[in-house]
């Protein structure tokens, strides 16, 4: 009898529990609506750097809907190219620099193949393309390509130095590289107008968070006052210090409007926040990492040479071809003659003219013409 009574009570207990569950769902649901409306009415916003981080990261991952392409998500591309320690080599490319008729990209890739033990590093190179034509070109000549675009901005054409498009491109690059760090990858960033002649990794400081090449090197790798950094070549390790530094660097564009990333870096490298972050910042010796501004004087030590202090794509291409020929001539020498002859780089031709014209100064040919006209 007792068993029968208990059996009859079970449906009542189940009904009671169901009513309780429904009541709890209603209470929690109603509370959520109230909190959501309150949050929205207060117009609470995330800090700017977090909003930027989310926007850049999502845009970087979203532009992958190219027809007939493989899986080209950022994570996939970085993982495929990464070294054993999660390091990738990264460069950026747009249509103008990928143009087969005037290609910085061809010269860049050729330098890896002509360099001393550098061809294997192509396995770890990720080319970040800024438009669809550059992406298509990349896919034809290289295996690690990622398509990154900025909504409402066309980066396909040559961005002339210090024009609004140039500045947007440079800052887009800085913010994107920060997202690479946040994903846990170290990167060696290289401009595509840098020729690779030797493996640079043995010449990096093992304990540095951020190390960068220079337009001018003072002789002291820790000198933040007289070293003049060049943003076209940097090796950065992924950690909280480097990530916070990149956020600060990017946000500093608001403090220094109309400046490009390199000049802003030159201004903030002495800021107290860099010290507070405990960032180990090093500058790289132009003996190993030279350029037109300050060439490496020893071909037996040089790792990279940059077409810096040069304005104009055609000027860069012209003089980089001369540089590559200098390297071919050097590599063709017998080993004993490489040291005894002490070969040097040919002086830049078009780039020296272009820089002087950009600064409003006469070059040697113009001075020679003026002298000829004066004394003839």
Image (cartoon, rainbow, N blue to C red):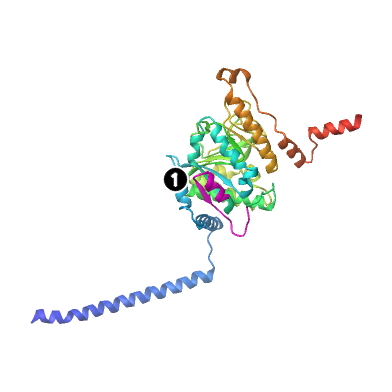
Q: Is residue 83 positioned above or below 59 on the image? A: above
Q: Between 231 and 276, which is closer to the camera in this rendering?
A: 231
Q: Position of residue 66 (x, y in %)?
A: 52, 56
The answer to whether any part of residue 168 appears in the image is: yes
Extent of the magenta region: 134-155
Q: Is residue 2 left or right of residue 296?
A: left
Q: Is residue 174 left or right of residue 81?
A: right
Q: Is residue 262 left or right of residue 68?
A: right
Count of labels in the image: 1
Q: Position of residue 206 (x, y in %)?
A: 48, 34
**Number of other residues with Cα within 10 Å of mark 1, as a class: few under 14, some 14 to 19, many 20 or more:** some
Q: Quadrant of the C terminus?
A: top right
Q: Position of residue 210 (x, y in %)?
A: 54, 40
Q: Is residue 10 positioned above or below 59 on the image? A: below
Residue 152 is inside the magenta segment: yes
The answer to whether any part of residue 227 appears in the image is: no
Q: Residue furthest left?
A: 1
Q: Give the residue at x 55% y 56%.
A: 52
Per the image, the residue denoted by label 1 is 80
- Which SS class for mark 1? helix
Q: Is residue 287 positioned above or below 249 on the image? A: above
Q: Quadrant of the N terminus?
A: bottom left
Q: Between 74 and 4, which is closer to the camera in this rendering?
A: 74
Residue 22 is inside the magenta segment: no
Q: Is residue 139 positioned above or below 327 on the image? A: below
Q: Give the residue at x 24% y 80%.
A: 15
Q: Between 206 and 100, which is closer to the camera in this rendering?
A: 100
Q: Position of residue 112 (x, y in %)?
A: 54, 35
Q: Give the residue at x 23% y 78%.
A: 14
């Amino acid at each position: 009898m007792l068993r029968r009574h208990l059996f009859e009570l079970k449906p009542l207990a189940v009904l009671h529990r169901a009513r309780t569950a429904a009541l709890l769902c209603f209470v929690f649901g109603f509370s959520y609506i109230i909190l959501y409306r309150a949050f929205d009415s207060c117009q609470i916003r995330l800090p700017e750097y977090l909003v930027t981080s989310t926007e850049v990261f999502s845009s970087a991952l979203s532009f992958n809907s190219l027809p007939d392409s493989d899986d080209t998500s950022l994570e996939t591309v970085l993982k495929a190219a990464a070294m054993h320690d999660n390091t990738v080599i990264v460069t950026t490319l747009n249509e103008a620099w990928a143009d087969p008729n005037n290609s910085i990209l061809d010269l860049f890739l050729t330098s890896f193949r002509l360099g001393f033990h550098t061809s294997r590093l192509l396995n770890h190179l990720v080319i970040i393309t800024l438009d669809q034509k550059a992406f298509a070109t990349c896919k034809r000549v290289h295996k690690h390509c990622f398509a990154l675009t900025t909504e409402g901005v066309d980066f396909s054409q040559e961005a002339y130095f210090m024009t609004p498009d140039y500045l947007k491109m440079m800052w887009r690059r800085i913010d994107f590289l920060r997202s690479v760090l946040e994903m846990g990858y170290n990167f060696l960033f290289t401009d595509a107008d840098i020729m690779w002649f030797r493996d640079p990794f043995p010449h990096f400081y093992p304990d540095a968070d951020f190390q960068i090449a220079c337009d001018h090197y003072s002789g002291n790798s820790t000198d933040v006052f007289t070293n003049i950094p060049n943003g076209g070549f940097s090796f950065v390790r992924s950690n909280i210090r480097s990530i916070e530094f990149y956020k600060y660097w990017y946000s500093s564009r608001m403090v220094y409007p109309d400046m490009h990333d390199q000049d802003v870096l030159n201004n903030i490298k002495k800021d107290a926040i860099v010290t507070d972050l405990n960032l180990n910042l090093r500058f790289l010796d132009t003996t190993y990492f030279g350029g037109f501004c300050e060439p490496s004087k020893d071909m037996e030590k040089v790792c990279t040479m940059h077409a810096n202090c040069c304005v104009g794509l055609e000027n860069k291409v012209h003089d980089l071809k001369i540089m590559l020929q200098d390297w071919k001539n050097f590599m063709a020498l017998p080993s004993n003659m490489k040291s005894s002859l002490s070969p040097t780089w040919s002086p830049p031709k078009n780039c020296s003219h272009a820089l002087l014209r950009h600064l409003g100064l006469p070059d040697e040919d113009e001075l020679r013409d003026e002298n000829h006209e004066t004394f003839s």
